Amino acid sequence: MAANHVTLSYLAPFAYGYYRRFGYEHVFDHAHQVMAAPDLPRVKPTDWSGTITRYGNDGLAQINDFYARQPQNQRGGLIRPAWWQHYLTLKHHWSVAIYRNAAANIEGYLIYERQATNFAIQEWVTSTPTAFERLANFITKHGTTFETFSYDSPSATNGLDLLADPYRLKVTVQPYMMARIVDLYDFIKRYPFLTDIQPIRLAVSDATLPANQGIWSLMRHNGQVTLNRVSDQLTGPADIQLTIQQLTTACFGTQSLARAYQHGLITGDVNAINRLDTSLVKERPALIDYF
């Protein structure tokens, strides 16, 4: 992958310990949520001007542009080219419900599967309150057909705060995918830092990819990122010492550098750690696709 200039790699591990040997780390979670049909909340939409249209797998192509525009899918999600959409139709027998407003613009969709006794929601994405209400109402209309309703949220977040009785929703947070930075230089140059960074030296260890290992000088000034490897050794002066795994999880927002320091996973100057931490994206990543 490094030879082909691949910047990032994701994988679904059969064993976390095995892939940690190659620089991968747990980054993504899912929240599996289940509710019994009698416990479904009553949803009464306030706006009925739009329409919901049901499709089979052919609906996937119609929602791709909307999917790509959603903020949650830009936090580590996949770009879905035509070949990937085709793969999904071969692998699954899904139904797609698309909500369009009165102007016929897509504002939300639902991908679901009718299992024997369970209404299994695979994706539920909306951009407006009306779309959320209408699709929620669409779901609850199936309350007499299925015993349970499930939803796999693409992050550890859940809908407990939206329910009058949160006890009715059973939530299990499940480790999902691993990730690793393959091309450290390219990744950092493209990373969406939140603030400028005074020069910091990072001693990054990466036993699998020597091109990433060494002491790197990082600076961001007026929005421009500068990254130089000043040594391919780890013995020189550095502000922060960390592995490629810890750098990956920090940049993805899965774990802060401050938390990693408190658990002894990284070492270095506390002030430098906090300065770099402030510049990193804090929202946890979200990944729907499985491969």
Image (cartoon, rainbow, N blue to C red):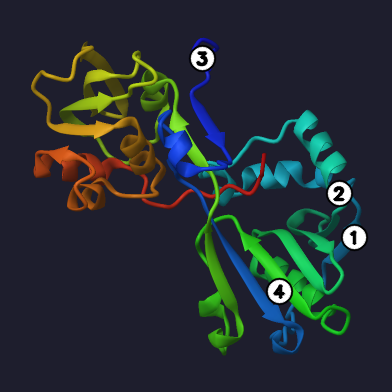
- Residue at the spot x=71%, y=74% of the render? 133
The residue indicated by pointer 4 is 133
- Residue at the spot x=43%, y=20% of the render? 183
* Mark sitting earlier along the chain (4/3): 3
Dot 2: within a 10 Å radius of its alpha carbon, few (fewer than 14), some, or many (20 or more) residues?
many
Q: Amino acid at mark 1?
A: Arg
* Mark sitting earlier along the chain (2/1): 1
Q: CA distance from mark 4 to mark 1?
A: 16 Å
Q: Is residue 172 above or below residue 7?
A: below
The residue indicated by pointer 3 is 5
The residue indicated by pointer 2 is 59
The residue indicated by pointer 1 is 54
Q: CA distance from mark 2 to mark 1?
A: 8 Å
- Quadrant containing the C terminus is top right
Q: Are marks 2 and 1 in contact (CB under 8 Å)?
A: yes
Q: Are marks 2 and 4 in contact (CB under 8 Å)?
A: no
Q: x%, y% of residue 121? A: 74, 63
